[in-house]
Image (cartoon, helix red, strand yellow):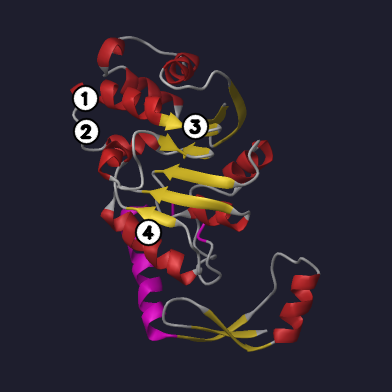
Amino acid sequence: MIVYIGSEGELIHRNGQHRLSIAKLLNLDKVPVQILYRNKNWLKFRKEILIYIRKEMKGKALQPLLHPDLGDIPSSWSDKRFKMIKQNLTTKKGTLLDIGAHWGYFCHKFEEISFQCTAMEGSIKNVYFMKKLKRAERLNFKIISKSIFDYKDCEDFKDDLNFDVVLALNLFNQFVGIEKKDLYSKFAEIFGKIRAKEMYFQIPEDEAMQQLGKIGEYKNKSFSFQELIDFIIKNTHFSHTKKIGEERNHGVYKLY
């Protein structure tokens, strides 16, 4: 089938509607298309993404870009983490918070399986790209342009962070700009405020040890990864943890 791409990245069918209808009836995930025309505004945005990734991200997007016209751009992470989380979900629908959402990959994927998603991202540049991609992909998830440490300033939150599912896959990226002396109290406070049925947590072991070695009562101590998990359990209402898999030597854990 032949498509045009509109000014905001929307796909406009030129022909092939009958073939698309048949593909939907057959529950096909993908159908081949030929792009006949791209709007100049979309071309400008596509070029902006390519330049930013080349200059600021060493030539790779952080996570897969899901718009059909951006699928050729390589990414550092694959779909593996989403698949392992999806397979381990106890909650099949409801509300989801992605802490450090970057460009909204996980909100996109979980919205597709009927979650009401909220993306929380402190980087203005990341929020800019996320909003553009959300519009291009015709998604509905909510974007909060704040660091998780500023959650008290959000009208969406009151005393606690109440969601069915919380993703904390890039949590330590939120520490940028936080004074070392404040890390322990802020880290413990955030985890203490999360009220969720389940949370998925990931951090590279060496970075975890480096960060925890600088904060609060843990200063100048050596840590194992299990001690980090125990620290998280201590500061949350969760009582169980299970490793559900790993990617790029990063363990992904389910807390429940």
Q: CA distance from mark 3 to mark 4?
A: 26 Å
Q: Earlier in the sequence, mark 3 or mark 1?
A: 1
Residue count near mark 1 (Cα–Cα under 10 Å), binned few <14, some 14–19, many ≥20: few
Q: CA distance from mark 4 to mark 1?
A: 32 Å
Question: Does 64 appear in magenta?
Answer: yes
Which element type, helix, strand or loop, lies under badge 3? strand
Question: Does 223 appear above or below 155?
Answer: above
Which element type, helix, strand or loop, lies under badge 4? helix
Q: Residue at x 36, y 53 (%)?
A: 57
Please name the residue that numbered disc 1 is placed on. Answer: 182
Is the residue under label 1 in contact with that under label 2 (CB below 8 Å)? yes
Please name the residue that numbered disc 4 is placed on. Answer: 53
Is the residue under label 1 in contact with that under label 3 (CB below 8 Å)? no
Residue 253, horizontal then vertical, whole percent: 55, 29
Mark 4: amino acid: Ile
Residue 192, horizontal then vertical, whole percent: 38, 24
Question: Does 177 appear above or below 12?
Answer: above
Q: Earlier in the sequence, mark 4 or mark 1?
A: 4
Which element type, helix, strand or loop, lies under badge 2? loop
Q: Which residues are magenta?
A: 39-65
Please name the residue that numbered disc 3 is placed on. Answer: 201
Residue count near mark 2 (Cα–Cα under 10 Å), binned few <14, some 14–19, many ≥20: few
Mark 3: amino acid: Phe
Left of 21 or right of it: where is 134? Answer: left
Tell me, for residue 178, which label it has, or none. Answer: 2
Q: Main secondary structure of the magenta part?
A: helix
